[in-house]
Image: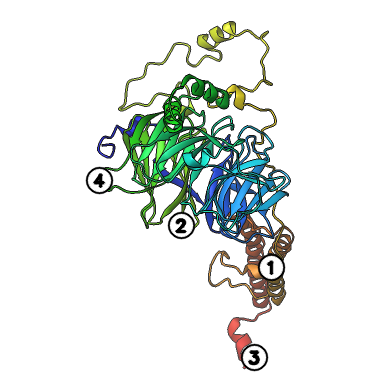
Amino acid sequence: MVGVSTVDPLQGDFPEVIEEYLEHGVMKCIAFNRRGTLLAAGCSDGSCVIWDFETRGIAKELKDKECSAAITSVCWSKYGHRILVSAADKSLTLWDVVSGEKITRTTLQQTSLQARLHPGSSTPSLCLACPLSSAPMIVDLDTGNTTVLPVSIPDAGAGAAPPPKNKFSDVTPSFTPTAACFNKSGDVVYVGNSKGEVLLVDYKSAQVRAMVPTSGGAVIKNIVFCRNGQYLLTNSNDRTIRIYENLLLSKDGLKALDELSEATEGQDDVEKLKAVGLKCLTLFREFQDSITKMHWKAPCFSGDGEWVIGGSASKGEHKIYIWDRGGHLVKILEGPKEALIDLAWHPVHPIIVSVSLTGLVYIWAKDYTENWSAFAPDFKELEENEEYVEREDEFDLIPETEKAKEINANEDDEVDIVTVEKDSAFSDSDMSQDELCFLPAIPSPDMAEQQEKCIESSSKLVDSNNSGSPLSEEGEPNGGAMNHASSPLEEDAGVARLKRKRRPSEKGMELQAEKVRKPLKSSARSSKLKNKSLVDEDTSNGFNGDDVSDEYH
C-alpha cells in the first residue's frame, strides 16, 4: 500500500515547513497565475484579493458592490489578463485584472462550486461551471446562455444537444456535485460522474465521445489535469486518488476521437465508448492512506507533474500528503490545528500554498540550510583547521591566474542583454509576449482616522513643549536624563512627524539626545563658573558665608 512505502525525504525537491502566512479577511480559495508571480484569493465577503507573490504584498483588490457572498472559486485566464470568480450567490463575474473593472456578471440557477475559463483563448468568454446539485454546463459569459453537459451515457444517447437557456426547468432532476475540467487545448471536457465514470464530452454538441470506468465505481469529487496535459487526476469517495496517463495528447482532440471511433466498429454504443476510452486514458497509479483510510481534499499536481499532493479532509487537521508519481509517500506536512479547505502548488518553484478554515493562507517552502560557500565561488568550508600554504603570487597586484583569465577573455564579443531566456517549465506554445506577470503597486490612501490621531498626538506634543517642564540634573550627574518635551529640537521633530507621519529611527533619536546634552553640559558648566566668581568677589570685599547669613538673620 502507498501509505507504507516511503522514500528518503532528503532526495526530493518539495516543501517542508511553513515559511510565511498571508492574512486578509477570511480567504476561502486560491489560484496562481501561470507564472506563479500572482496569487488570487477569494474571500468570504465577496472580494477577490490579488497578492504579488514575490513581495507578499496585496497588488489589487477586486470587489463587486452587488456581491457580498463568499467566493467559491477563482480562475485565471491563459495569459493572466482576466479572472473569473464564482460566488455563493449563484453569480459568475469576469474581471479585467489590470484596470480592476468588472467585464461581465452572470447569475445562474444554482451556486457553482467551481468555474473554469476556456484555456484555449487569451480573452475567453466561455467557462465551464460545476453547480452544486446539477450537471456541469458551458456558460457564455457574453450572452449568459448555458449548455448543460451530459453526465451519463443515456443522456448522450438522446442525440441532439439541449437548447441553450438561462434557467433550468422545474423538472430538472437533481444530481450530486459533478466534477469536470477542460483538457489542455480546451476542445474536450472530462466529466467525472456519480457512477465513478470519466466521460469525454464534446461540449459543442454536448455528446459523450468516450467513457472510462474507474475500478472503485465511487463518486468522483475532483478531476484535474497536470500542466502539460500528460496526466489526469481523479479523487473519489472511496478515499483513493487515481492518476491516469492521457493518451490523447494531440492538439485536435476531437479529430483524434473521431479516428478512434471509426477504428472501433461492430460494437454497441456503450461498449464502443468504453473501447475508445481505453485508448484515451490508462490507469497509472493509485494513492491512498491504507491505515487511516481518510478522505482527500483539493488534490493536485506539482508544476512539473512529478509530485502529487492531497490535503486531509479530517476536521481540525491541517495535513498535506506528498507522493512522487511512482506511488511513494515521501512527506507528510503537518500544519496548525485548523481544517484545510484548499491547496495549490506553485507552477515553477517547490512551494505549496494552503488555505485553512480560519481564512489564513499558509506558504510551505523548503527548509534551506545556510551554505556560506554559495557567497564566494572559491570559498571552501573546513571541518577542522588545516595548514595553509600561500601561493607565490597571492599578494601580487595582478596575480598570474588573473592575467591568464584576461588573455582568454575576448573583449570583442557582443553581450546580448535583450534576449530573454525561455523557462524550461513552459513549452513554446505557452509563451506569450502579452502575458501579465506583475501588477504595478498602487499606494493605499491614508485613512481619515489615522490623520485625526496623528493631529491629536501632535497637538498634545506641542502643548507639552509649551509647558516648559524643568530639566532634572539630579537624576543624572552628567545631565543624561532630560525631558525631551521641553527641547526645541523635539518641537521640530514633532512638526516633521506631523508632516511625514513617520516615526524617527533609534539612531536619529540618539543623535538628537546628544545634540541636546552638549548645550546642557555647557550651561551647567557656565552656571558653576558664575557661582564661583560671585564667591570670589564676596571674599575679596571682606565677606564670608557666615557674615552674610548673620546679616540676613
Q: Residues within 10 Å of mark 1 (few under 14, many from 20)?
A: few
Counting from the top left corner in percent of width and height, residue 70 is at 57, 58
Report the residue marked by disc 3.
Answer: 551
Mark 2–mark 4 distance (CA, rounded to whole Å)? 25 Å
Report the residue marked by disc 4.
Answer: 291
Question: Along the polypeptide, which appears first: circle 1 or circle 4?
Answer: 4
Judged from the image, the secondary structure of the residue bearing numbered disc 3 is helix
Mark 1–mark 2 distance (CA, rounded to whole Å)? 31 Å
Q: Residues within 10 Å of mark 3 (few under 14, many from 20)?
A: few
* Badge number at residue 464: none
Q: Please count the marks in the image.
A: 4
Foreground tag (1 vs 4): 4
Question: Along the polypeptide, which appears first: circle 1 or circle 2?
Answer: 2
Disc 1 marks which amino acid? Answer: Glu
Counting from the top left corner in percent of width and height, residue 410 is at 63, 7
Mark 3–mark 4 distance (CA, rounded to whole Å)? 104 Å
Q: Residues within 10 Å of mark 2 (few under 14, many from 20)?
A: some
Q: Is residue 305 above or below residue 361?
A: above
Q: Is residue 438 above or below residue 71?
A: above
Disc 2 marks which amino acid? Answer: Leu
Mark 2–mark 3 distance (CA, rounded to whole Å)? 87 Å
Q: Quadrant of the N terminus?
A: top left
Q: Can I make out residue 438 in this image? A: yes
Report the residue marked by disc 2.
Answer: 357
Q: Which residue occupies the foreground of this view, 483 or 63?
A: 63
Counting from the top left corner in percent of width and height, residue 324 is at 37, 32
Q: Can I make out residue 424 in this image? A: no
Counting from the top left corner in percent of width and height, residue 334 is at 36, 48
Disc 3 marks which amino acid? Answer: Glu
Foreground tag (2 vs 3): 2
Mark 1–mark 3 distance (CA, rounded to whole Å)? 65 Å
Q: Residues within 10 Å of mark 4 (few under 14, many from 20)?
A: few
